[in-house]
Amino acid sequence: MNEWNRKTGIRERKRSMKKISIMIPCYNEVENVEPISEAVVAMLQKDLSNYDYEILFIDNASTDGTRDKLEEICSRNKKIKAIFNVTNFGQFNSPFYGMCQTSGDCTVVMCCDFQDPVDMVPVFVREWEKGHKVVSGIKSSSRENRFIYFLRTVYYKLIRNMSDVKMIEHFTGFGLYDKTFIALMRQLDDPIPFLRGIVAEYGEGFNMTEIEYEQPKRRAGKTHNNFYTLYDAAMLSFTSYTKIGLRLATFLGFICSFLSFVVAIVYTVMKLTHWYNFNAGSAPIVIGVFLLGGLQLLFIGLIGEYILNINTRVIHRPIVVEERRINFEE
């Protein structure tokens, strides 16, 4: 009877404890999944022992043994969960879907490679307890490649000035999100969700606060960011949250047409008034063709990006398709 009372008391205490969800997306992170899980569990037990917790890894179809390692980790700790995607759904869909599968009172999103410092989680939780339902981690500096950091800074400033939404500079998604914000995310029904834009658009309504941190270097393995992934992120934010691309195409098209018309009039007048002395040659025609051709190719590509964005939304494929999940039985 005493043992039954003891177990009942433990269950009641757990029910009364707030629950923190840690969501960690991963792709080919066999060297990092075990160290990050150990570091997060140690931090939770040391600094946030008065909270219940769950850790959710969502694997984006890794091919390096990450899944085998996750199965082993989950078998040792039932509070560590895993979702395996049937294929790679990209750097935006998978984390967004993972956040929507958490069950905590708040969800902390962090990378698997230790570039999002584990010791920032208690700082986020303290801000959450003050009433901030969204706590965004902002990189004040970074130990990554300086040139890449500079390019990111330029990109953030450009997109911030061009966007209809006030974008957050040097924000990667690392932060804490209250369950009410997670509930909003589940309602959005967006097939290509861009978390940074969503937080920028709706965060203020959830008493958002920003916390600065220094981004360390990746602990192990190779970064999955390359020119294509960075370009993909830039174009998704550009086509989802700005109108300037299409407006710029319209304005420049009008200006080029006007200038071409003026030049044509000038050349016609010069030829009529100096018929034998004025020799225009083919240079103006060649320059004009290349100028207009370059502008046309540029803006056809830009319009194509908008159409691709629209097409993806119209098709409305699932954000993620699961192969299986582990430790979701409770």
Image (cartoon, grey):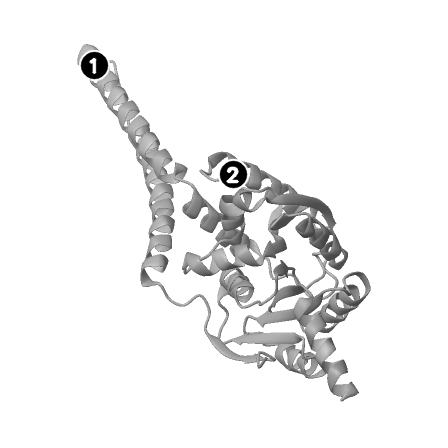
Q: Which residue is mark 1?
A: 269
Total numbered badges shown on the rendered structure: 2
Residue 184 point in image, percent of width and height:
48, 56
**Residue at the right extreme?**
46
Position of residue 190 relative to residue 252, above or below, is: below
Image-based side of 14 in relation to 287, left or right: right
Q: Answer yes or no: is residue 216 visible.
A: no
Q: Residue 141 falls in which quadrant of the image?
A: top right
Position of residue 133 relative to residue 70, above or below, is: above
Q: What residue is rendered at 70% in x and 52% in y?
A: 124
Secondary structure at numbered mark 1:
helix
Q: CA distance from mark 1 to mark 2?
A: 50 Å
Q: Answer yes or no: is residue 94 visible.
A: yes
Residue 58 point in image, percent of width and height:
58, 70
- The amino acid sitting under disc 1 is Val
Please name whichever residue, 294 or 87, is drawn nearer the observer in this view of the structure: 87
Please name whichever residue, 66 or 326, is drawn nearer the observer in this view of the structure: 326
Q: How packed is label 1: few (under 14 Cα within 10 Å), some, or many (20 or more)?
A: few
Secondary structure at numbered mark 2:
loop
Q: How packed is label 2: few (under 14 Cα within 10 Å), some, or many (20 or more)?
A: some
Please name whichever residue, 42 or 279, is drawn nearer the observer in this view of the structure: 42
Please name whichever residue, 63 or 266, is drawn nearer the observer in this view of the structure: 63
- Which mark identifies residue 176? none
Q: Residue 308 falls in which quadrant of the image?
A: bottom left
Q: Is the C-beta separation of discs 1 and 2 under 8 Å?
A: no
- Which mark identifies residue 166? 2
